[in-house]
Amino acid sequence: MELILVLILIVFVGGLYTYNKWQVKKSEASFPPSGSFVTIGNYKLHYISEGTGDPIVFLHGGILSSKDFKDVVQLAGKQGYHAIAFDRPGYGYSDRPKHKEVNPMFQAELIHKALGKLGVDKPIILVGHSWSGTMTLSYALQFPNEVAGIVTLGAVMYKEGYPAEHGDILSKITTMPLLGDFILSTLLKTPLGKGMADSMVRSTFEPERAPEEYKRRSICYRFSTKSF
């Protein structure tokens, strides 16, 4: 009897894993990368870029990717800037470093190396939204002579008073060793995972309503086990 239960559990988990992988591939087909990639060490970072001139770099918040800034990047490019928006490590199409402390300082250093490899040699204007407010300050602290200005948008600067100052349950679970990998490999694309993503997007936009296209992108977008 115990052997039968073990076999059923193995088949069930295997089915979830296969279903999750299939759904990830569908998402990748629905939302292919629209930009380019730059490789830093063992990591690939995805970015979109428009225009030439003084560089302005956009860093997105805790959900989604550089696509948040797609229209702004195009507008800035037309205004004479070299506009660049990155998928932060672990988001969109950028790899997540296998690093225990993927903190703002570490991510800022990774972005700095990426800009160097892209040939950006002028001081940059940094635009940080939400979570990237902290990352923007981290960048300026590490490379003060390479920053021409800072723009923050609803930015997180200090954890005190920030709704997620103690972290959220979903993030804590998915970043746990072994358990996090298991959940991301089996439940991410199930109705449970999609429901949690939908709830996060709704909370982000409250009291306004989240645009339907934004919700669809966040639920179907490529957050594969590789990214996490």
Image (cartoon, grey):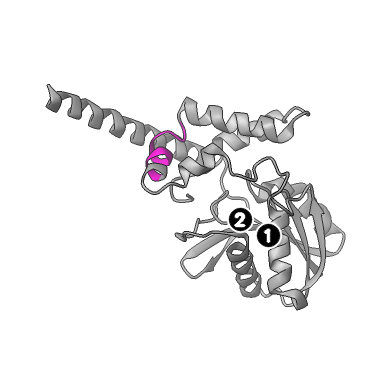
Q: Position of residue 21 (x, y in %)?
A: 40, 39
- Farthest-out residue, right: 79
Q: Main secondary structure of the magenta part?
A: helix
Magenta part of the chain: 181-189
Number of marks? 2
* Image marks 2 and 1: residues in contact by CB distance under 8 Å: yes
17 and 48: which is toward the camera: 17
- In the picture provided, is 113 more to the left or to the right than 78? left
10 Å crowding of disc 2: few (<14), some (14-19), many (20+): many
Q: Which label was assigned to residue 153?
A: none
Kind of residue at badge 1: Met
Kind of residue at badge 2: Arg
**Residue at horizontal 49%, vertical 31%?**
193
228 and 102: which is toward the camera: 102
- In the picture provided, is 93 more to the left or to the right than 4? right
**Residue at horizontal 62%, vertical 65%?**
105
**Residue at horizontal 47%, vertical 59%?**
100
Q: Position of residue 29 (x, y in %)?
A: 51, 40
Question: What residue is shown with label 1?
Answer: 135
Q: Is residue 182 magenta?
A: yes
10 Å crowding of disc 1: few (<14), some (14-19), many (20+): many
Q: Position of residue 143 (x, y in %)?
A: 71, 74
Q: Is residue 166 magenta?
A: no
- Farthest-out residue, front: 160
- In the picture provided, is 16 more to the left or to the right than 135? left
Question: What residue is shown with label 2?
Answer: 88
- In the picture provided, is 147 more to the left or to the right than 34? right
Q: Secondary structure at mark 1?
A: helix
